[in-house]
Amino acid sequence: MIVVLALDTPQEVLDAVRDRIESHPGLTAQVFNGVQRIVVGVLGSIPPDLKDELEVIPGVTEVVPISKPYKMASREFHPDNSTVTVGDAVIGGPEPIIMAGPCSVEDEEQMVSTAKAVKAAGAKVLRGGAFKPRSSPYSFRGMGVEGLELLSIASKETGLPIITEVMSPADVDTVARYSDILQIGARNMQNYNLLDEVGQLDKPVMVKRGLAASYEEWLLAAEYVMAGGNTQVILCERGIRSFESSTRFTLDVAAIPVIKRLSHLPIIGDPSHSTGHWYLVSPVALAIIAAGAHGLLVEVHPNPDVAKCDGPQSLTFENFRSMMDQVKAVSGVTRIMAATT
């Protein structure tokens, strides 16, 4: 349920609405100051008479039940687009933000050289895996805390903020000390204990779509984080499992405009994990940007042939520069089209 008030509503009226909501056990009120109105979201199990109670308060314009099971992530609750700011990057703004780097941290030279190369090409965030969920227990599973320290060195060298994955609730505090954005991987999208834990942070969290997750399940995962108090959530479409074997996963391009219609949260796309082949990364990246995504998550490695993880889908520095030129061109056309429609 949302309670709509005029933008110039006095504070005493807003306090009266909040007090009435929170006088009911189990209910909390979340206030959003929009561009044209104030919206108060009611979270919890809504009693049947609450709508009538709120509508009689002077200054309340409208009381609207929210049909979606995800409340805070819903555009009904938050009609204006949300942005997440990290360093110089505004994710959800007019410019697509590119997050780039190797799948796995391997050594200092690899991380520093990659960080410098992707920054020079226009990337705004450095990615790199220190903790890696792998299908096989015998595959390289990351360097752990040592990898986080190498990410930190590369970040200090270049000024790029860091995004890296956290896999366990027990690791959240450690990863948060090093990372500017915590990534929830596809395999952990429904790890509710982990979602609860990152919901307690005052740091951005990126939630990747699960391998077979519906849009609603994906947005409910984001809701877990937001319900904990952390509203700095980014969504990432990374491809879903299908019958096709020519690509690693099937990127759902339609997810981008659909999610933008359902939710106010920024959404980016991952052309690397979805395709599994370096030569498909650039064309799929362009499709993601053309569909209206707010950015990309791309794997880049100085020598993909010897990468310990996901070498076949990693771009070289030269290929990344070429992709960035194309992304800038498509993004410019997309903005022009959006301005004229």
Image (cartoon, grey):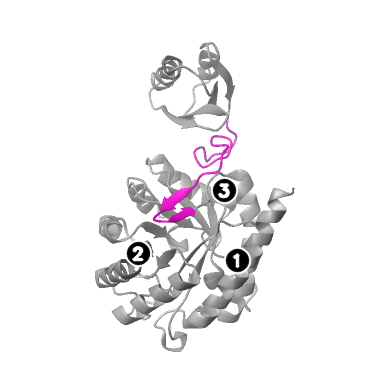
Residue in the picture at 35% in, 62% down: 167
Is residue 318 rendered to the left or right of residue 133? Answer: right
Residue in the picture at 52% in, 27% down: 38
Rendering quarter of residue 293: bottom right
Q: Are marks 1 and 2 in contact (CB under 8 Å)?
A: no
Tell which tag, 3 or 1, sits nearer the viewer.
1
User: Quick check: can you spot residue 17?
Assistant: yes
Q: Are marks 2 and 3 in contact (CB under 8 Å)?
A: no
Say if the magenta span includes residue 211. Answer: no
Residue in the picture at 67% in, 58% down: 334
Residue 226, relative to residue 65: is it above or below?
Answer: below
Residue 313's x, y, as percent?
Answer: 52, 79
Q: Marks 2 and 3, how far apart in space? A: 36 Å
Upstream in the sequence, badge 1 or badge 2?
A: 2
Label 2: state its secondary structure: loop
Residue 67, relative to residue 279: is it above or below?
Answer: above
Mark 2 surroundings within 10 Å by alpha-carbon count, few (fewer than 14), some (14 through 19), many (20 or more)? some
Say if the magenta span includes residue 81. Answer: yes
Residue 302, relative to residue 55: is it above or below?
Answer: below
Rendering quarter of residue 327: bottom right
Q: Which residue is mark 1?
A: 328
Residue 329, relative to residue 224: is it above or below?
Answer: below
From which residue to which does the magenta span run?
66-90
Label 3: state its secondary structure: helix
Residue 163's x, y, as percent?
Answer: 39, 62
Residue in the picture at 54% in, 39% down: 69
Q: Which residue is mark 3?
A: 216
| 309 and 178: which is toward the camera | 178
Label 1: state its secondary structure: helix
Upstream in the sequence, badge 3 or badge 1?
A: 3
- Tell me the tag on residue 159: 2
Mark 1 surroundings within 10 Å by alpha-carbon count, few (fewer than 14), some (14 through 19), many (20 or more)? some
